[in-house]
Image (tube, rainbow, N blue to C red):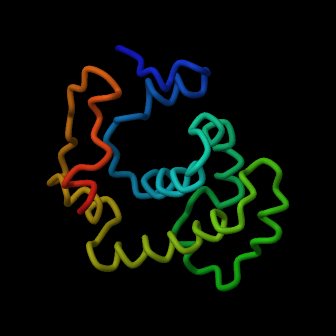
């Protein structure tokens, strides 16, 4: 397997690249975890988040969105004291907001996976880019 340029800087990136990146999943908890981790990495780099991944799982109840959505007043201050995660108040709070949105999608579509995979009819899109410059910043599916 050809390893992407972005995954050549650390073992955590390489393992993620080879075992998870681009691998379709319909696992609701894992999908929610990826959504939250992508939010955490905004403005940062993915390697940093991968190296803190277990700390995020510990801090956010293994990304159990059904549970997180029921937390009336999340103790953001206590989570912010955790030096093992990125301590950005808005990013921490977004996990709880995302959980409520995930529950709403499950109520509407029957599952989080079904809600998200509907844009590709449940089938992954496999691109054959020759270089990173060929990757589009947006597609019709991503915009939808």
Q: Nearer the viewer, residue 106 or 3?
A: 3
Residue 49: give x, y in percent of width and height. Answer: 62, 42
Residue 44: give x, y in percent of width and height. Answer: 61, 44
- Residue drawn at (81%, 71%), measured in percent from left and top? 77
Instruction: Report the side of 32 relative to 95 (left or right).
Output: left
Residue located farthest toward the top when viewing the structure as drawn: 1
Residue 134: give x, y in percent of width and height. Answer: 27, 30
- Residue drawn at (28%, 65%), measured in percent from left and top? 115
Instruction: Report the side of 100 relative to 40 (left or right).
Output: left
Asked if residue 108 is positioned above or below residue 62 in the image, the reply reads: below
Instruction: Report the side of 68 relative to 109 (left or right).
Output: right
Residue located farthest toward the bottom when viewing the structure as drawn: 72
Asked if residue 88 is positioned above or below residue 104 in the image, the reply reads: above
- Residue drawn at (59%, 20%), measured in percent from left and top? 9
Asked if residue 23 is positioned above or below residue 102 in the image, the reply reads: above
Residue 116, by quadrant, is bottom left
Residue 139: give x, y in percent of width and height. Answer: 23, 50
- Residue drawn at (43%, 70%), measured in percent from left and top? 102
Q: Nearer the viewer, residue 67 or 39?
A: 39
């Amino acid at each position: 397997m050809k390893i992407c340029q972005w995954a050549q800087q650390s073992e955590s990136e390489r393992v993620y690249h080879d075992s998870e990146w681009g691998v379709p999943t319909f696992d609701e908890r894992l999908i929610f975890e990826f959504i939250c981790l992508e939010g955490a990495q905004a403005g940062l780099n993915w390697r940093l988040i991968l190296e803190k991944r277990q700390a995020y799982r510990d801090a956010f109840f293994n990304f159990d969105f059904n549970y997180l959505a029921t937390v009336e007043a999340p103790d953001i201050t206590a989570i912010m004291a955790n030096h093992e995660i990125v301590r950005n108040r808005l990013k921490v709070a977004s996990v709880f907001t995302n959980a409520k949105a995930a529950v709403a999608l499950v109520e509407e579509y029957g599952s989080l996976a079904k809600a998200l995979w509907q844009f590709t009819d449940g089938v992954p899109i496999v691109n054959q880019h020759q270089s990173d410059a060929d990757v589009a910043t947006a597609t019709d599916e991503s915009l939808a």
